[in-house]
Image (cartoon, rainbow, N blue to C red):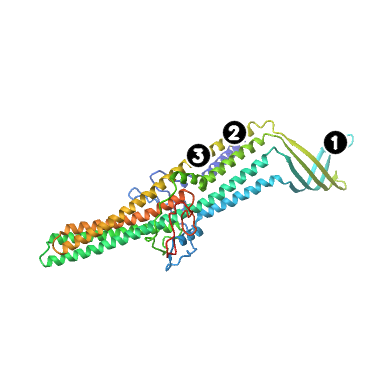
Amino acid sequence: MPRPRHGRCRIVLASCLLLGGCNDTRDLAPSSPDLPWQVPDQSAGAAATPATPPAFVVPHDKDLPWPTDPPDVDPAHRYSLVELIDIAERRNTATRIAWEQARQAAIGVGIARAAYLPSLTATALAGYQRIASPFPDSLVARGYITADAQEVLPELAVRYLLLDFGARDAAVRSARQLSFAANVGFTAAHQSLILDVAEAYFALDGTDAALRAARQAASSARVLQQSAEAMAARGLATVVDVSLARRSTAQADFDVSAATAARHRAMYALLSSLDLPPDTVLQVEDSSARPLPRQTGDTVDAMMRDALQRRPDLLADLARLRASTAAVAEARAELDPKLSISANVQGNIGRISVDGGRYENVEQPQTGLFLRFDWPLYQGGLLRNRVRLAQSQEAEARDRLAENSEQALRQVALAYDQVDTDLSQYDAATALEAASEAAARSAQDAYAHGVGTLTDAVNALSALAAARATVARAHAQSLVDGASLAFATGRLTSGAAPGLGEAGAVTPFPHATGTQDP
């Protein structure tokens, strides 16, 4: 007899081992850190051999989404900055996420206010039950009786919290502050988007201006090369001069290619800020004639003070601090008693049969009115720890507000100084460009008349190209830093144009006469 038992044990053990082997997960991860992961259904025979370099690639999946919504962009239209911002605000996912968060926070206020209202609950319990109960054998020979019950128990209950020592009020205050913070965060998301689009737009315009300067330099280099070749044909220039002129032309052509590549990168950056596909054909208006930021009449101290009262991120931090303060009051109120009233109306619709006899039914209503008092005396430190956690979160929110306020002040001071520095650099760059143009003309004329050297002419042309590129960069950087100053002070908006636009304040993008996009 023992052998069959042992045989059955072996069968059970073997079955467990077999089932356990079915849960082997070693093939779900790479076998070693230097070998690629193999797709489970393709791993057989697909492992890399020592002679074959490992291919760290993953299989394609057709279920991944491909953008099918064509961008609403007219390839023949030249878009202004305001129009580009409008496109970005319609397509950007970050602003949609911030919008959903604001809606969720508003719903949270409704959830918190619901605690002030009574709750009404309708329930119904239906079922069948067979019960066997002991019974004196002097009455029932078998010593027990059975009962078959069929019941439907409907109930309507109402409950209202009368007193909670401010817990509901604190919860509503916290929810309102969080809703305010979410709405301010929605505004901050739009301001950040506007800044990204403006920076990409001005950077693209700067690369356009640099590309135009590079093409002008290439054209001048070709003219100089033709002049050198003509003079060499008449015996007035050497082979070295011709080689030097050709090298200058080749360098100018390379600079054009480099400027073109920089322009392509700037366009991709603009398309990315607009959430447009990288193959979108987009034309933008030229902003080279856009007026630069004006000198502000406000002191940096006044602008910093204004930023502390206006920046969306700081206002959101302040609202979160107020919400955490209300959360501390709510947690403390949970330690206090609560008084509530409840009432119910219920019925017993059912019937019962004892020992297989005939069913007896009862259909009588039942009512109840209760006054309930709850006071948590001991819960293992749960409520006390909740108070300490809320106090810690309040301290964290206070420190975060202080840290972000100091960072905001540094951003305003830096942007303020950078705008002034940019304007000075732009003035110096335009003066350098004018002097370089005069020097280049003089050097070319001197060489053409045989009284100057080719080296001087080439150097003058190179200096002119560099000066024109410097002017383009200085102009674009001034506009970018003007937008940064508006963003740092919390005044960047998508109105007529990004800027502050208030009397007495710096206006990085003042209206330009005769232009559609100020």
Q: Which residue is mark 1?
A: 135
Q: Which is more toward the observer, 219 or 266?
A: 219
Q: Amino acid at mark 1?
A: Phe
Q: Which residue is mark 3?
A: 402
Foreground: disc 2 or disc 1: 2
Instruction: Residue 444 in the image: state x and y as whole percent.
Output: 19, 62
Secondary structure type for disc 3:
helix
Q: Amino acid at mark 3?
A: Ala
Instruction: Residue 330 in the image: state x and y as whole percent.
Output: 64, 38
Residue drawn at x 75%, y 48% is: 120
**First in sequence: mark 2 or mark 3?**
2
Secondary structure type for disc 2:
helix
- Please identify the residue farthest to the right as the structure is shown: 139
- On screen, residue 429 versus residue 115, left or right, reads left
- On screen, residue 293 versus residue 433, left or right, reads right
Mark number displayed over residue 388: 2
Residue 261 is at least partly visible in this image: yes
